[in-house]
Amino acid sequence: MKTRERILQTSLALFNEQGEGAVSTNHIADEMDISPGNLYYHFRNKDQIVSELYDRYHTGLSSLLDVPSDVVLELEDVWLFLHLVLERINEYRFIYDNLTDILRRSRPVRRQFGFLLKAKREAALSLCAALQRSGMMTASNREVEDLSTSIVMVATFWIGYESATGTTGLPQTGGGAHQVMTLLAPYLREPERSHLATLADAYRQ
Amino acid sequence: MKTRERILQTSLALFNEQGEGAVSTNHIADEMDISPGNLYYHFRNKDQIVSELYDRYHTGLSSLLDVPSDVVLELEDVWLFLHLVLERINEYRFIYDNLTDILRRSRPVRRQFGFLLKAKREAALSLCAALQRSGMMTASNREVEDLSTSIVMVATFWIGYESATGTTGLPQTGGGAHQVMTLLAPYLREPERSHLATLADAYRQ
C-alpha cells in the first residue's frame, strides 16, 4: 500500500478513535513510523487530509443515496438500505463527532455537506414515495416532507447519540435502522405495521 | 460584574460563535482586555471554564425537565415547553457543536450528560403519558418508548442540523418545536391532530 493511502487510512482510524481535534499530523506520522517531513510531502496540513477523507465519504454515500424514483420496495429492503447508510456514516463518524467545527473550517466541505443533506432528504422522500406506491404507507405530502426530515436527523445523529448515552463497544447500526423504522411505523397499513413490529423485536436488546 | 463572571459569559459567547475548539484562553483574555495571568487566577485552564459552563447548562435544563408526573397539558403547553428547552440548548449550543470531543475530555461531564439524556427521555415519556391521560394521544407503551427516543434526538440535534443545512441567522427554535410536534402528530386523535396542523402552519416558513 502506498504511503499516501496509508496516511489517509491511519488518519481516519485515529480521527474516529480520538476525535479529529485531538489528533495532529505529528501524531499521525508517529503512529505510522514515518517522519513528519514524509507526511508533509503528501499532505501540507491536516485540513487537506480531512478534506480528502470527506470527499471519499461524500462520493460513497452519494452513490448509495441515489435511489431510483421508480424503485419497488419491501420493508426488508428499507431495513437493509438503512443499515448500509448507517455503516457508511459509522465508517466516517469523526465528521459527525465534530460536525459544526469541520464545516466552519472549510467552505468547500460546508457546501458539499449541504448537498449531501439534500441528497439524504431526497432518498428519504423516494423511499416514502415507493412505500406509498406499493400501498404499504398512507401519508399526506406534508407528512412525508416532515417525516423525511426526521428520518434524516435520526439516521445522521444516531451514532453520536449512542456515544453520548454511553453505549459501549461499536455503535449499533441496527439500533439506528430500528429507530428510523419506528418513525415510519404509524404511517404503515396494518399487515406491514405488525410485520415491522416483528422485525423490530429481533433487534430489541 | 465580577471578572470571574465576565470570563464565563465571554467564553460562552466566543465558544458559541467560533466553536470551543477554536477558542483559547489567550483569545478569551484578549477579548476581555485582561492579561492571561488575570484569567489564569480565576481558571487554571479552558477545561475548567467548559466544565463550569456545562454545570450551569445542566442545572438549568434539569429543573426545566422536571415535569410533574400528574401534569395536565394542552398542545400549546407542549409547544411552549419545547420552545423553552430548545432555547436553553441554543444558549449553550457550543456543547452540541463539539459534543463527542467535550464528552471524551472530561469523565465528570460525560457522566452528567448521561444523566441529562435520561432526564430528557423521562420528560418526553411524562409528556406522552399526560397526553394519553387526557385522551388526546393513543399509543402502546413500546410506541411511547420509541417516540420518546426520537423526540430527544430531534430536540437535541435540531440546532446542529439547522447549522449544517446552512440556515442563516439565529437557529429557529420554533422549527425544532415544530419538528418534534410532527413526531407526535400520527398518535394524536382527530380534533387535536387537525389543531396541530393549524398551529404548524403558523410556523412553516
Image: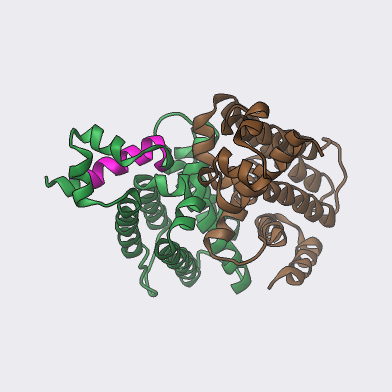
Chain colours: A green, B brown
| Residue A117 drawn at (x, y percent) | 47, 63
Determine if residue B125 is in view: no
In the displayed structure, does residue A162 sit left or right of residue A30? right
Residue at image position (37%, 40%) is A16
Q: Residue at x 29, y 37 (%)?
A: A26
Is A148 situated left or right of B147 in this image? Answer: left
From this view, report whether residue A51 is shown above or below residue A174: below
Percent from the top left, x then y, of residue B60? 76, 37
Corner quadrant of residue B140: top right
From the image, which quarter does the N terminus of chain A lie in?
Answer: top left
What residue is at 74 percent from the left and 67 percent from the top?
B200
Q: Is residue A123 above or below residue B68?
A: below
Where residue B65 sits in the image (x, y, percent)?
76, 39
As for residue A15 lying within the magenta part, the answer is yes
Chief SS of the magenta region? helix
Q: Is residue A200 left or right of residue A63?
A: right
Residue A205 within the magenta-colored segment of the rendering: no
What's the magenta region?
A6-20
Q: Residue A49 versus residue B90: which sits nearer the camera? A: A49
Residue at the extreme left:
A1
Where is residue A174? Give x, y as percent.
42, 42
Count the marks: how many?
Answer: 0
Residue B14 shows in this picture: yes
